[in-house]
Amino acid sequence: MQRSGRPRTFSEREERWIVRQAHINPKTSAVKLTLKCKSRFRKSVNPETVRNALRKLKYHVRLPRREPYISKANRKARLAFATMYIKQPTEFWKNVIFVDESKYNIFGSDGKQKVWHTPNTALHIKNLRPTVKYGGGK
């Protein structure tokens, strides 16, 4: 049956492929996804079309949260440490000193990175920007 209006640029299958690519690497830009679409589907489209396909399936571009980088081995060790001390009484914690160290850029930013993610996935490891306590500056 013939319908009025402009025909779809991407089929549902192609849109799912675009979303999968953004899910695999959330830091991929819409321009790079457009180039991948051009080579895979032989379709020359505007990056805004790719953005629209992602937004339709609840993916939005956001600045990633900046959290300290913690390797897999350290994550495992931290979890073991936390479970060891979880049942300590409040008197024990009154004698503990907590220290927080952070890196600050005095001479400007490290540049903006953006990630594609769905609601409530901002703290997933793929969607974070890892930071370190040392380095930077002249």
Image: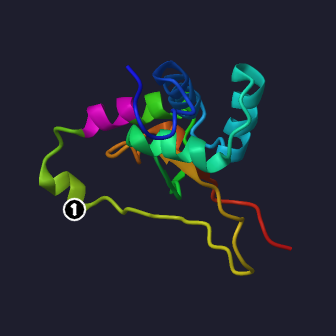
x 44%, y 64%: residue: 99
Would you say the magenta stretch is mainly helix, strand or loop? helix
> Magenta span covers which residues?
79-85
In the depicted structure, whether residue 12 falls above or below residue 63: above
The amino acid at mark 1 is Lys
- Name the one closer to the observer, 137 or 33: 33
- Name the one closer to the observer, 85 or 12: 12
Q: Secondary structure at mark 1?
A: helix
- The residue labelled by disc 1 is 94
Q: How is the image coloured?
A: rainbow
Query: Where is residue 71, by image quadrant?
Result: top right
Query: Where is residue 91, by image quadrant?
Result: bottom left
Q: Position of residue 34 (x, y in %)?
A: 70, 38
Q: Position of residue 120 (x, y in %)?
A: 32, 45
Res 69 visible: no
Res 42 visible: yes
x 65%, y 41%: residue: 28
x 64%, y 56%: residue: 113
- Name the one closer to the observer, 96 or 2: 2
Q: Is residue 46 left or right of residue 121?
A: right
Q: Is residue 37 left or right of residue 96?
A: right
x 61%, y 67%: residue: 103
| Quarter of the N terminus within the rendering | top left
- Name the one closer to the observer, 89 or 81: 81
Q: Find out whether residue 81 is within the magenta segment.
A: yes
| Quarter of the C terminus within the rendering | bottom right
